[in-house]
């Protein structure tokens, strides 16, 4: 694996360890625009990477008692069903359109992350402690929606899962964060399974990339005790806005077709360097 690939894999894991999320937001753009993989291939690989790194993070929270299995398993089952359906449906969606949707979700994630970095977010988290489960039909719809987004564009969805677990399932904030990592891992693995048979997976490259990302999350988890989470989230939200806007700019032709009468076809060229089903040479 090239040195650049190792470095970026470590960055993905580091963001998950420091912030408890954000790794999936970085993975797909890195695989597409830096390492030159096809969009659909990148989404599938991103799900595998984020699934494994999130599982490591969930194990750490499990040891601290921050994973609520009984409360979260029904929610996880619903999100997994939505994820698998989204992954299978993605076969019929052009890769370039998936990237546009991904960029839009990046901007939404930036909004949530910036809002949660403000001082009153901590007060809101304290009020959420000891909450009660909310509207069950809304919970079902939320779980299916989050899962569908995960399968379609390869986003782990932690920025959506955490508030859902707090507001609709009544989990305390710390337990919501730990539980969300387990849900993200399960969603990601199911989404990855949904892509198998439809994309070519470079297993050796994926294994090495994932291993380095796992090391990154361990380092990030250790370092998170020494840095300001609020400052990190504000900086990361700005970074997401820049990346999301950049992806939209690269795919502005697709946006123009969506705004007009011309359909986006499945043969639209990938915005990355020539897509290949093999491991990039760089």
Image: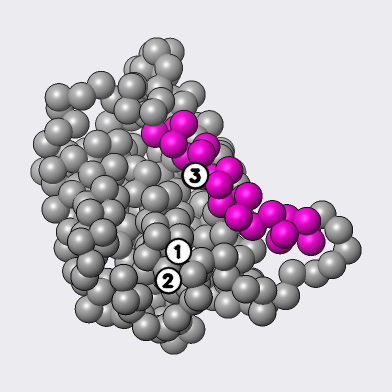
Identify the mark nearer the N-term, 3 or 2.
Answer: 2
Side (left or right) of 122 relative to 40: left
Looking at the rendered structure, the secondary structure element under dot 3 is: helix
Q: According to the image, what is the colour scheme of the structure?
A: one colour
Mark 2 crowd level (few <14, some 14–19, many ≥20, 10 Å Cα): many
Looking at the rendered structure, the secondary structure element under dot 2 is: loop
The residue closer to the viewer here, 193 or 218, is: 218
Per the image, the residue denoted by label 1 is: 32
Q: Main secondary structure of the magenta part?
A: helix
Please determine whether, in this image, residue 141 is positioned above or below residue 199.
Answer: above
Side (left or right) of 137 relative to 78: right
Tag count in the figure?
3
Identify the mark nearer the N-term, 2 or 1.
Answer: 1
Question: Does the residue at mark 2 contact the one at mark 1 (Cβ under 8 Å)?
Answer: yes
Report the quarter where the N terminus lies: bottom left
Give me the disc on residue 104.
none
Mark 1 crowd level (few <14, some 14–19, many ≥20, 10 Å Cα): many
Per the image, the residue denoted by label 3 is: 243
Please determine whether, in this image, residue 205 is positioned above or below residue 176.
Answer: below
Chain part drawn in magenta = 236-258
Per the image, the residue denoted by label 2 is: 37
Residue at 67%, 74% in the rendered image: 268
Inter-mark Cα distance, 2 to 1: 5 Å
Inter-mark Cα distance, 1 to 3: 13 Å
Please determine whether, in this image, residue 96 is positioned above or below residue 234.
Answer: below
């Amino acid at each position: 694996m090239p040195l650049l690939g190792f470095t970026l894999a470590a960055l993905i894991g580091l963001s998950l360890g420091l912030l408890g999320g954000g790794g999936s937001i970085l993975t797909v753009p890195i695989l597409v625009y830096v390492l030159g993989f096809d969009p659909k291939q990148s989404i599938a690989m991103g799900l595998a990477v984020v699934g494994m790194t999130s599982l490591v993070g969930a194990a750490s929270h499990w040891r601290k008692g921050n994973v609520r299995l009984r409360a979260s398993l029904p929610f996880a089952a619903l999100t997994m069903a939505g994820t698998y359906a989204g992954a299978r449906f993605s076969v019929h969606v052009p890769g370039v359109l998936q990237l546009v949707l991904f960029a839009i979700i990046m901007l939404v994630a930036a909004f949530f992350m910036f809002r949660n970095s403000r001082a009153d977010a901590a007060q809101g988290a304290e009020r959420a402690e000891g909450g009660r489960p909310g509207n069950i039909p809304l919970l079902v719809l939320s779980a299916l929606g989050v899962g569908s987004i995960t399968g379609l564009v390869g986003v782990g969805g932690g920025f959506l899962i955490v508030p859902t677990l707090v507001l609709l399932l009544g989990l305390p904030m710390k337990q919501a964060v730990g539980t969300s990592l387990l849900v993200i891992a399960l969603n990601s693995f199911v989404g990855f399974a949904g892509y198998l048979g439809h994309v070519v997976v470079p297993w050796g490259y994926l294994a090495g990339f994932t291993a380095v990302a796992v090391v990154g999350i361990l380092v990030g988890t250790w370092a998170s005790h020494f840095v300001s989470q609020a400052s990190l989230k504000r900086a990361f939200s700005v970074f997401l806005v820049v990346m999301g806007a950049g992806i939209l700019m690269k795919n502005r032709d697709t946006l123009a077709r969506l705004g007009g009468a011309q359909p986006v076809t499945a043969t639209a060229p990938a915005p990355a360097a020539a897509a290949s089903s093999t491991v990039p040479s760089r």
